[in-house]
Image (cartoon, coloured by chain):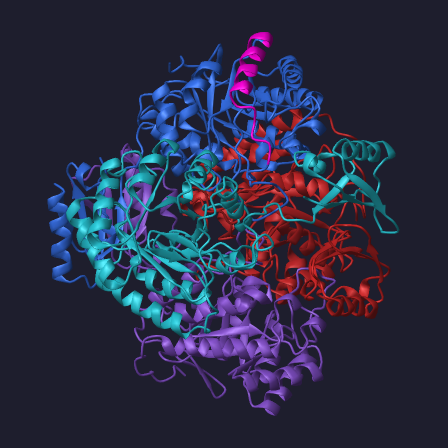
Chain colours: A cyan, B purple, C blue, D red
Amino acid sequence: MPRMLLVLKPGCSDADRRRILDALAAGGADVREVPDLAVPVLAVTGDLERLRDVALEVFPGVAQVVRVAKPWTLASRSYRADPTVVRVGDTLVGGPGRFTLIAGPCAVESYDTLFETARAVKAAGADLLRGGAYKPRTSPYAFRGLGLEGLRMLREASRAVGLPTVSEVTDPRHVEACVSNVDMLQIGTRNMSNFDLLVEVGRSGHPVLLKRGRDATVDDWLLAAEYVLSQGNPKVVLCERGVRGFDPATRNTLDLAAVAVVRAKSHLPVIVDPSHATGLSAYVAPMARAACAAGADGLMVEVHCRPTEARCDAAQALTPEAFAALVADVRRIHAAMRPPAPTPAPAS
Amino acid sequence: MPRMLLVLKPGCSDADRRRILDALAAGGADVREVPDLAVPVLAVTGDLERLRDVALEVFPGVAQVVRVAKPWTLASRSYRADPTVVRVGDTLVGGPGRFTLIAGPCAVESYDTLFETARAVKAAGADLLRGGAYKPRTSPYAFRGLGLEGLRMLREASRAVGLPTVSEVTDPRHVEACVSNVDMLQIGTRNMSNFDLLVEVGRSGHPVLLKRGRDATVDDWLLAAEYVLSQGNPKVVLCERGVRGFDPATRNTLDLAAVAVVRAKSHLPVIVDPSHATGLSAYVAPMARAACAAGADGLMVEVHCRPTEARCDAAQALTPEAFAALVADVRRIHAAMRPPAPTPAPAS
Amino acid sequence: MPRMLLVLKPGCSDADRRRILDALAAGGADVREVPDLAVPVLAVTGDLERLRDVALEVFPGVAQVVRVAKPWTLASRSYRADPTVVRVGDTLVGGPGRFTLIAGPCAVESYDTLFETARAVKAAGADLLRGGAYKPRTSPYAFRGLGLEGLRMLREASRAVGLPTVSEVTDPRHVEACVSNVDMLQIGTRNMSNFDLLVEVGRSGHPVLLKRGRDATVDDWLLAAEYVLSQGNPKVVLCERGVRGFDPATRNTLDLAAVAVVRAKSHLPVIVDPSHATGLSAYVAPMARAACAAGADGLMVEVHCRPTEARCDAAQALTPEAFAALVADVRRIHAAMRPPAPTPAPAS
Amino acid sequence: MPRMLLVLKPGCSDADRRRILDALAAGGADVREVPDLAVPVLAVTGDLERLRDVALEVFPGVAQVVRVAKPWTLASRSYRADPTVVRVGDTLVGGPGRFTLIAGPCAVESYDTLFETARAVKAAGADLLRGGAYKPRTSPYAFRGLGLEGLRMLREASRAVGLPTVSEVTDPRHVEACVSNVDMLQIGTRNMSNFDLLVEVGRSGHPVLLKRGRDATVDDWLLAAEYVLSQGNPKVVLCERGVRGFDPATRNTLDLAAVAVVRAKSHLPVIVDPSHATGLSAYVAPMARAACAAGADGLMVEVHCRPTEARCDAAQALTPEAFAALVADVRRIHAAMRPPAPTPAPAS
């Protein structure tokens, strides 16, 4: 699939050139020199599958390798022009004119707070309920979630309030239990490059919410999505949640341009998590509005019925009242955007 | 003004403690020990002005210095609670319910393109005309602007179309000529920490558009504003234009959360430049909408009547038609936001 | 364990203060106000274990929370003053005067290249043999390693040339197979925050080489080490391999100051991987020398008997000849550093 | 000078292609299509000087622009293969086998401390004396240096102890006074992109120490050097001093690989400032050793006869005793590196 141009170094020796041509020939490529340029350039065509793992950059005579085709395919717009719509329970994510709200506590902590928060976010207009049962925490001494018990609570809350659920999975050995209990599997920022886990959620066929790694370019992120898609699972929703930045004023640097970049490069839906991005509840509403205006397909927001009692990431949780105000704001902004085209059918 | 807590190291020797107390006493501070903590902590009060340049962190026994008061004052909300409104010619920037559009070419290149672009942005609803006469360019071989001749063209264009102007100043020796010809002085990202220049534009009393340095935290940026304010010039408008990030998908990483952070910490107006932030015209409109929804006081957008002929940053320039569509989008979003409180009077 | 100071906001209301005091009392803390400061400050002592998950930052009246004690313990110098020495097979890592060289191919590809490379690095003075059997790759279509077959090849190569081995583990389900076949388990940069995996390698009791996450601060990294240590496994060696930076001139930004920071904060050995840090073989030798001079306990270097045939990361692999020259350089620099103190006994 | 390849979009229309070809023809370029690739590619040759400011990336049909030649020339190895040696007073900087030590206080504060420190660093083996008279400070309320008076003190100290001097210039209006009083002009990190200032120090013909911008890639930095060189001033020494990073453990992230990158791309000497890079005196010595081993041409280190009295950056200043120990360490490491080739003559 990749076609490429090899820019050689001006003084590339004949021996170095010979080694490059041999490697290309061994890989089954067709090569021609582009004549009359300031420096020698080789144009490489043919079936380059066997050259995939040959590091042409390493050859002494090579100055630059320009790969003409993108490294991913299933996630790209050129593979599928229409936006993908992912069905999660009864809810759809993605497609023009649709804006999906995921809300709930950072972690499932107890029956009472989960049910109270679930009812509140449902009443405020949420489409999906979030809640972590397996919590990756920077410190081994912090609360790490209720595990399987938490998943079961989520399932009951889902039935009680009538919202499909999403919860994070961090270990390939937990995928089965998560599939049985929740409607969508979240891959958190710390596990975006946990490829064994990506393969496992790909195989499950279950809807996947794939958060961007804190250190990932958009291309890295789309290649992580490709891990899931290449297992035959098309139900991937991307979630921007901020990257590592140098300003401690916010927990991460929310990269809203990534929403536009994903839109240009891929057919997958993309939502935004303003809670983890900023880490402070005061900044969640403005960034939620901005995400909507940037063209995101939805939001994931942390809401807790009593934030000061939350055992995890309390500083960024909204009260139900603040969430309801945010929903009203965002719905008005969404309505003010251009009239949408008709929505395509879901991918699944 | 600063009051502080000095956390000492657990094993701080008596001699080390003595040296610390001597330095504090020499600086005129009052010191008491906070009793019964796990580690020794000194509470420091009094007039600490003379301690400003004493690096207490360097003393062997000191583990941490907690300065209780913020390092800036004139730019902070605690100095002035109401939002500042800056008058530029007949136009106001800042204050609730107002959204100001600055548009025009990256560089002033010729009478014809400047006048044609100026008329087009005025027709589309711009409030101020931008155009660079002194262009900081990464390469010394790139087009660096028309200088004084460009400033004069701007003044003529301003009169012809009836828009006040903003143009970048890069050298203290040019401040006077810029003040004579344009209505607002722009400090670009590369000069945010050019403190001699900041002092000079502060002294001029002219309105200043202060772009965020590509490597600046919001606190660094507000301290740069403090350089201007402390010269007795209150007419400062901040402009977020992206910081250095690791993803080459966009030219810089637009940090829209900085708009919310500035709003929380400062009374100064803050606008957003989506053109330099993304570097690609396709991403300008979504980021302009997002900036509005995030609560910015306005936008600065590069528009060129014929982008493919632009001599500078053409990849990010909008056509007049694309700009007009952007204005319509942004106005609808602005109207959809909460009803504003009454606008205070301008600062100047 | 944590003792803290709570700096309250200047205008903190009585009701807000009451809520804070109630939360602290509910957590079992002792609280006193520090009198006569410019702002109210609460000094908090007692057994604060139950306050660990209470987000005091979120309370309306709180301006700043200063935790006096460090969040990690087992990895810190205050827990153990002497440097830890980790035994891997017959080889020791860490301790003054010792400098350990890990070398080998990025991936185990075939018997022939593995054995040839293993003999070459042994001859050049390597102390441990590296080779990846499970390779995390950004693209799902790249070569991902030989898996179990690769581990068995490594075991045979280890016996044949007489070098203990280190290989990456990426999935908790593979830990047992890795423990059976290699002498040290590597946690790669992408899995530094894969906490389920960290717990599993902690439980194994096997030596662990913990690479720094590309987006991790030194504190994050030491907390990842704490995950392993807190399972009762003291055999942790840290490996700096570059963090995300903005300059594409090198693959990552090698943060050699982190070696000095780790040395100041922790008793664990720390080595450096200049191959992944720079991504280009031409920069490996200067960075290897620099790592030695910075005080690292060793190096991990990619070596391949025929780099242009390598199926993975070929651009950064050294030839055996280049590696031998690097070893000679580094040994001379190591000898030129200060005469070491006597080496303590290994931790295990 | 630039030759380039234009990769067109797969579906590039005939009209879009026509516009591209017209623009290239208008710029005087010769164009041929590279046949039989997966996508259309245009090879562009001829005198492309007039295309320098045409943003080909902006044309609708263009997918990628590959510029084959580097954007800088005078700073590059291809312009001058031998290392440049810069003479500063009686001292030489650059060239194989030479290692130059610049030391002194951050700021010139008083006769007594300057002279005492100058004598101490001379005795410890320093080759040049540093001292700031114009200090760029993040806060307008911090000590900003003694200005002209400080320059005069430096000149006297230089004569008294027999060391040439380097001092920072921040304003084009101060260049003349600096040239009259010190032997080398320093451009600080905040002014690396202050192009008016670079042009002015270029015109002066005086030796220039050009620090890397905190947000600058190596290519940006070499283009800043090109500003000086292109004024006919070849006496440029580069200084790496750390870039913006996300880990607050050090003040900046020292990018020592940049030393190797500069060495590969440019003939200019490059030294390292471990004091500003780390911000903490405890990390200065290990990073100084690492810089030497990485192949730097020298060091710039902050030394103060009484660090606890320093009015600027005291946390990073070494005592004269610590500096003397550092010099001994670094000299041993330098001697342990490969035997150098003969040194070329100075550039000036």
Up-down relation of residue C126 to residue A255 (above or below): above
Q: Does residue C159 show up magenta in the picture?
A: yes
Q: Residue at x 83, y 47 (%)?
A: A39
Residue C326, position as x, y percentages in the image = 65, 24
Q: Residue at x 30, y 80 (%)?
A: B341
Foreground residue among B245 and D37: D37
Which quadrant is the N terminus of chain D positioned in? bottom right
Residue D138, position as x, y percentages in the image = 46, 58
Q: Does residue D327 show up magenta in the picture?
A: no
- Residue B66 appears in view: yes
Q: Residue at x 74, y 33 (%)?
A: A27
- Residue B73 appears in view: no
Most common secondary structure along the magenta stretch: helix
Foreground residue among A343 and B274: A343
Residue A279, position as x, y percentages in the image = 34, 53
In the rendered structure, which segment of residues is drawn in magenta? C142-161
Foreground residue among A315 and D163: A315
Up-down relation of residue B246 to residue A195 (above or below): below
Q: Is residue A233 left or right of residue C146?
A: left
Q: Quadrant of residue A161?
A: bottom left
